DNA sequence: AAGTGCCAAATTTTT
DNA sequence: TTTGGCACTT
């Protein structure tokens, strides 16, 4: 309808073309910050406006969050929730479709091996069910076990890592691996093991082997959109091809310069081959950058121009700003952390919200020093990219109990729980699980098992828990409550030093579970798509600096970005060889630097602790030395006081006002005041509701409730 | 002699 | 937060 004219003005020519091409395959090559999300959002809106029913749209994104955000924005645009559009990750959509077609998934209790308890369990299973001679030495790493089982050993690590003393020749080793893989299938079915790749393989199998299913899926989803296409793997590309075989209405969006997931099987040639896979593809380039200022763009272009293989896009921006990216060579990690802390405090004084600042780094542990410094200065932070909520040990303990209620033959979960008992170790646990897996009723078998004198107390509590749970009504919230009562003493013993911090996770789990009415459904959901910790639950003031690995920062943006640890040996990662891996590291730096809107700081420590625990001098990352010196400004500590930094002759340029607008608090608004919203346009505030939301009557879109953390409202004067 | 507990050492990125 | 080596208990 007339929404078309309203968003016509907000898009440039290329974006508008992408939005309005409704038939046939479209490949959108999008640079960093080029309004990819916006283009997809408007396209969803455009299709629905044009009479396409929401059910016919399938939106595949990289994270579940991205899909949710796009649908939320599209819903706002249409004054409708868009809840009937199907959106999600490949995995969650696969799960949904497979469930609907009843194809393939036997057990739905999947897991990722993350800690010792699980690794022990796997080894026990291999020993008992495959009768392989496996000892600990042969499995030095949990990752390798996973990779062996999923058949992608050589992808993850050089084969040499896997050759152990017991193997005289590579061929012997290969035979054992093949044997393992052969057994893997039945192994999975027997023990309810499933991983991410299985889901995709099953989805693809559904499409290739069942013509009816393919027909139905293709007929239902007549408009398929894929975001971050450069991160898809070949199976995902095949799925897209098969799902769209009836109509070819596929629009994929991606940027080859941001391909950073090859270690996970992503093949960025997917995006280059797209026009061959879909003949008649219309290629649209999005080259205008809407995020960063020109000096930042100049530097990031410089980074990617050094790439061996690149597909030229000329990014330009109309955003004004003259601040060059700053490069700071710190004496050591402590000085680097001090630098970030003092700059963050200055920025805060200038009115930049902590939420608008991010610190990015290559590996999780690079931020350890900084975390300490931030803590001692009382600056709140939120770290992203570590473990997920359900991946931490204490969560897995609780989940193991719940999982067993759904599938009592889940030996890994039994193993895990038995190990929580004091004086009961891996050997005893293995004996017990062996008995349980042969029993008709594992819980009864557990109760009948003769307990050893030293551990009978803890064992009796575990038996009691399961007998109690079996008697209860299967209401997830209540079951979880009972589990937590059992877990509390175990938990306090296992994590004596830091259990108060972990306690909050458990409370959160309880609230999440309480919202389900079927336990099985909960287990299915968490297995595939672990819920993330809700940051709100951990903060008091709602303001926190973001610390994130570069990988988890993908697709996000901040006013001010610090990239730390840019030292030789840390970035690129020490084990990256020149060649493909090296190039991927370079793209990683490109992704990091393009997250910044107004200001970018690059820093590295000149001294690092080596493997021998001795400090050694290190240089800057080779990626930095390649840059032309004019694209950044060096920042030197003032000798007199190492905590104060001089910024050369340039007077500190105040950040442009949008920063401050984003920081509006509820008290800045009053009932009756006029505001402006990027989607809804002008409106009048009707009601303020605590803590950070307000009702606004928009002139063109009616009454909406907005949350200040999400909505970017501007107050219109007069 | 097997099994368990404890301390020191090292750690890529993740749907 | 996991892993490997060593001492201590059953």
Image (tube, coloured by chain):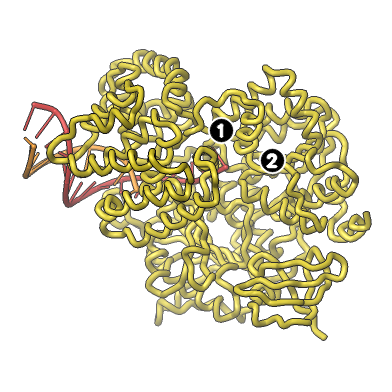
Chain colours: A yellow, B red, C orange
Residue ID for mark 2: A60
The residue under label 1 is A265
Q: Is residue A577 left or right of residue A372?
A: right
At a point 85% along the width and 30% down the height, the residue shown is A280
Indicate the secondary structure of the residue bearing disc 1.
loop
Secondary-structure class at tag 2: strand
Relative vertical location of residue A591 with respect to residue A675 in this rendering, above or below:
above
Residue closest to the eye, A364 or A536: A536
Between A43 and A306, the one lying in front of the other is: A43
Q: Residue shown at 55%/81% (left/top)?
A: A349
**Crowdedness of circle 1 by 10 Å Cα count: few (<14), some, many (20+)?**
some
Does residue A116 appear anywhere in the picture? Answer: no
**In this rendering, would A23 be left or right of A328?**
right
In screen coordinates, is A357 left or right of A420?
right
For the N terminus of chain A, the quadrant is: bottom right
Q: Position of residue A615 (x, y in %)?
A: 30, 57
Mark 2 crowd level (few <14, some 14–19, many ≥20, 10 Å Cα) = many
User: Is A507 situated above or below A460?
Assistant: below
Q: Which of marks 1 and 2 is nearer the N terminus?
A: 2
Q: From the top left corner, tell me how far across and down residue A404 is, in percent.
A: 40, 35
Give me the chain letter of mark 2. A
Mark 1 vs mark 2: same chain? yes
Q: Residue at x 27, y 19 (%)?
A: A133
Number of numbered discs: 2
Quadrant in the picture for residue A488: bottom left
């Amino acid at each position: 309808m007339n929404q078309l004219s309203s968003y016509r003005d907000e898009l440039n020519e290329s974006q508008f073309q992408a939005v309005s091409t409704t038939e046939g395959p479209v490949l959108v090559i999008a640079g960093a910050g080029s309004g990819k999300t916006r283009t997809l959002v408007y396209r969803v809106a455009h299709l629905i406006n044009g009479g396409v029913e929401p059910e016919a749209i399938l939106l595949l994104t990289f994270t579940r969050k991205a899909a949710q955000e796009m649908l939320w924005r599209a819903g706002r645009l249409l004054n409708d929730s868009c809840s009937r559009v199907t959106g999600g990750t490949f995995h969650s959509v696969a799960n949904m479709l497979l469930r609907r077609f009843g194809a393939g998934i036997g057990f739905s209790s999947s897991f990722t091996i993350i800690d010792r308890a699980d690794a022990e369990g796997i080894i026990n299973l291999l020993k008992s069910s495959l009768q392989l001679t496996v000892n600990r030495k042969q499995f030095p790493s949990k990752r390798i076990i996973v990779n062996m089982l999923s058949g992608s050993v050589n992808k993850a690590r050089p084969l040499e890592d896997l050759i152990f003393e017991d193997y005289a020749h590579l061929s012997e080793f290969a035979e054992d691996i093949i044997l393992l893989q052969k057994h893997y299938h039945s192994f999975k079915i027997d023990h309810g093991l499933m991983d991410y790749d299985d889901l995709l393989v099953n989805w693809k199998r559904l499409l290739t082997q069942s013509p009816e299913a393919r027909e139905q899926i293709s007929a239902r989803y007549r408009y398929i959109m894929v975001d971050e296409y450069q991160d898809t793997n070949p199976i995902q590309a095949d799925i897209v091809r098969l799902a769209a075989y009836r109509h070819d209405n596929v629009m994929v969006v991606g940027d080859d310069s941001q391909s950073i997931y090859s270690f996970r099987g992503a093949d960025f040639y997917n995006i280059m081959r797209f026009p061959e896979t879909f003949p008649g593809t219309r290629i649209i380039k999005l080259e205008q950058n809407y995020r960063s200022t020109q000096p930042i763009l100049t530097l990031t272009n410089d980074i990617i121009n050094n790439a061996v293989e690149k597909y030229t896009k000329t990014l330009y921006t109309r955003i004004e700003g003259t601040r060059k990216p700053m490069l700071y060579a710190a004496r050591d990690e402590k000085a680097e952390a001090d630098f970030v802390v003092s700059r963050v405090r200055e920025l805060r004084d200038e009115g930049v919200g902590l939420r608008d600042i991010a610190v990015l780094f290559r590996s999780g542990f690079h931020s350890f020093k900084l975390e300490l410094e931030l803590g001692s200065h009382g600056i709140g932070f939120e770290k992203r990219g570590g473990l997920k909520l359900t991946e931490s040990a204490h969560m897995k303990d609780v989940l193991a109990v719940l999982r067993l209620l759904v599938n009592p033959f889940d030996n890994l979960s039994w193993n895990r729980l038995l190990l929580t008992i004091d004086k009961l170790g891996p050997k005893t646990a293995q004996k017990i699980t062996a008995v349980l897996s042969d029993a008709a009723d594992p819980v009864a078998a557990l109760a009948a098992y003769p307990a050893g004198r030293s551990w009978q107390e803890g064992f009796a509590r575990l038996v009691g828990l399961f007998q109690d749970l079996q008697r209860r009504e299967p209401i997830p919230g209540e079951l979880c409550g009972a589990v937590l009562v059992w877990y509390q003493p175990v938990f306090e013993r296992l994590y004596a030093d830091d259990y108060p911090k972990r306690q909050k996770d458990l409370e959160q789990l309880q609230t999440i579970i309480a919202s389900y009415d079927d336990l099985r459904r909960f287990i299915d959901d968490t297995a595939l798509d672990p819920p993330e910790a809700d940051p709100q639950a951990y903060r008091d003031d709602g303001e926190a600096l973001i610390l994130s690995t570069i990988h988890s920062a993908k697709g996000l943006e901040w006013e001010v970005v610090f990239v730390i640890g840019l030292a030789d040996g840390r970035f690129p990662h020490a084990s990256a060889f020149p060649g493909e891996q090296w190039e991927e590291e370079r793209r990683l730096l490109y992704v990091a630097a393009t997250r910044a809107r107004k200001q970018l700081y690059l820093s590295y420590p000149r001294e690092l602790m080596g493997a021998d625990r001795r400090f050694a001098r290190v240089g800057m990352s080779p990626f930095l030395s390649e840059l032309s010196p004019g694209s950044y400004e060096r920042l030197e500590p003032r000798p007199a006081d190492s905590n104060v930094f001089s910024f050369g002759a340039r007077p500190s340029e105040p950040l442009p006002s949008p920063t401050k607008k984003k920081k509006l608090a509820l008290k800045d608004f009053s009932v009756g005041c006029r505001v402006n919203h990027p989607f809804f346009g002008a409106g009048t505030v009707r009601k303020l509701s605590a803590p950070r939301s307000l009702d606004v009557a928009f002139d063109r879109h009616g009454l909406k409730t907005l949350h200040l953390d999400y909505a970017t409202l501007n107050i219109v004067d007069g």
